Amino acid sequence: MADKHTSESRTGRFEKKRQWTKRLPWLAGAAGVFVVLLISLILFNGNDQTGQAQKPEEEQQTAITKSDTEEVQKNESPEEPEEEADPDKTSVSMEGFEELEPIKEEEGVQIEESDNPNVESVVTKDWPVIPTEMDTNGSHSITYQEGQDYKELQEAARSAVNLSEDNIIYWWVGNDGGPQRAVVTVSDKNETGYLRVYVQWVDNEGYKPVKLEVLKEKVVNR
C-alpha cells in the first residue's frame, strides 16, 4: 500500500511539473509583449513631451523672425512725415475760384498782376455803389462794429466777390488808411480761396468796392 501511494505521488508531481513546463513559453511570450508595450509607451510619452516643450520655442522663434522682418521693412521704407497744413496759408488762383468767373466776363473789368508777392492778381471795375439806408447828413466815418454801417460795408464786399451772405466768411474788416476807406478779407465757406476787397464810402450814396485782390495765401489782416 505504501509503494502504491508513493507511486501515485510521484506521478502527480511529474504531471504538475510537465504542465508548468508547458506554461513557461506562454508566460515568457506574454512577459515579452508586456515589456515591448511598456518600452513603446515610455518612448511615445518622451517624444510627445519633447514636442510640446519645443512648440512654444518654435512659436517664439517665428514671432522673433516676423518682428525682425517688419523692422527691416520699416527701416528700408521709412514713412514720410506728414506735412502739417498751415491754416493761415492756402494757395488759390483766379481760375479755381468759380465765383470770380462771371466777374472776368463783365465789361470794363481789368485783371492785372501785382508787385505784392502774396497777390495772385488784381481786379478792378466800376462796381455799383451799395445804397445806404443811413442818414449821414453829408458826414460819415466808417464804424467797425455791429450795426447798419457795418452791415452795409459787408454787403459791398460781398457784391465785389459775388458771394452770398450764407456762403461767406469775413476774415478781416479794418481801416485802409482813412475814415472813409476800408479793406475786407473774405472767402467762401469751403475756403476755396481768399479775396481782399477795398471799399470806399461815397458821400450821400453808400459803399462802393474799388479793387479786388486774389490772394495766394490767407492773411487775416492787411
Image (cartoon, grey):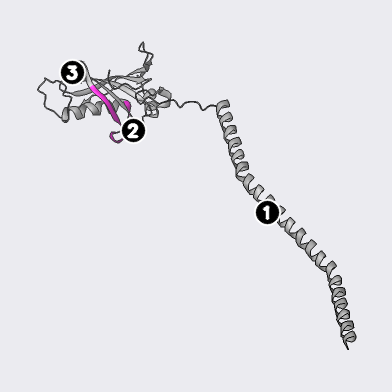
- Locate the C terminus and report the quarter of the image it occupies: top left
Residue 191: x %, y % from top left: 36, 29
The magenta segment is 161-173
Query: How many marks are shown on the rendered structure?
Result: 3
- Give left or right: position of 214 versus 175: right
- What type is the residue that disc 3 sits on? Gln
Marks 1 and 2 sit apart, C-alpha to C-alpha, by 76 Å
Q: Which mark is residue 189?
A: 2
Whether residues under marks 1 and 2 lie with C-beta atoms below 8 angstroms apart, the answer is no
x, y percent for residue 120: 39, 18
Q: Locate residue 189: give its quadrant.
A: top left
Are there few (<14), some (14-19), or many (20+) residues within 10 Å of tag 3?
Answer: some
Q: Point out the tag, 1 or 2, that comes first from the N-terminus.
A: 1
Residue type, label 2: Lys
Q: Which mark is residue 180?
A: 3
Q: Which residue is mark 1?
A: 45
Residue 34's x, y, as percent?
76, 62
Foreground disc of the pair 1, 2 = 1
Please give the name of the residue rendered at 35% of the width and 26% of the height, measured from the top-left corner: 87
Could you tell me which residue is drawn at 88 percent across and 83 percent down? 8
Q: Quadrant of residue 201?
A: top left
N-terminal label among 2 and 3: 3
Q: Amino acid at mark 1?
A: Asn
Q: Is residue 185 left or right of residue 14?
A: left
Packing grade of label 2 (10 A; few <14, some 14-19, many >=20) is few
Q: Is the N terminus in the top left, top right, bottom left or bottom right quadrant? A: bottom right
